[in-house]
Image: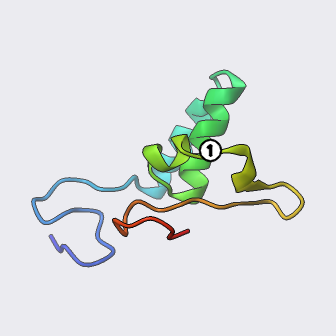
Amino acid sequence: MGYGAHSLWNNTGQRLYLTPKERLHFLKTAQTFPPEWRTFAELLTLTGCRISEALALKPINFDYSDNRVAIETLKQRRTGVW
């Protein structure tokens, strides 16, 4: 099993991401939950952001006129990377 830069697995063999089929199942299941939970699940799935990144979002991060969301990434381990 390979552990390349875009691998489904980390260097200890643990899964990192969902497969496309699992993502579809997750989104389908999310449809059965209240709107705020469904929206949160869709945000995570469609942006690929981390839970903590999504929880840190504020209304100012959303540009409804352009259908965009600005998410500050935590992966770079420094602030100000959007």
Residue 36: image quadrant is: top right
For residue 65, what is the image quadrant?
A: bottom right
- 50 or 19, which is in the foreground? 50
Q: Position of residue 26 (x, y in %)?
A: 52, 39
Mark 1 is surrounded, within 10 Å at the Cα level, by few (under 14), some (14 to 19) or many (20 or more) other residues, namely some
Query: Residue 21, position in %: x, y?
Result: 48, 51
> Where is the N terminus found, in terms of image quarters?
bottom left
Q: Residue at x 66, y 44 (%)?
A: 58
Residue 34's place in the image compared with 50, above or below, is above
Q: How many marks?
A: 1
Badge 1 marks a residue whose secondary structure is: helix
Q: Is residue 66 left or right of residue 77?
A: right
Q: Nearer the viewer, residue 29 or 6?
A: 6
Q: Position of residue 30 (x, y in %)?
A: 59, 32
The colour scheme applied to this rendered structure is rainbow
14 with respect to 43 (left or right):
left
Looking at numbered disc 1 in the image, what kind of residue is underneath it?
A: Glu
Kindly give the residue lying farthest to the bottom in the view shown. Answer: 4
Q: Residue furthest left?
A: 12
Locate the C terminus by quadrant. bottom right
Q: Which residue is mark 1?
A: 42
On the image, which quarter does residue 16 sit in?
A: bottom left
- Residue occupying the point 64% across, 33% down: 38
Residue 29: x and y in percent read 56, 31
Q: Is residue 60 left or right of residue 45?
A: right
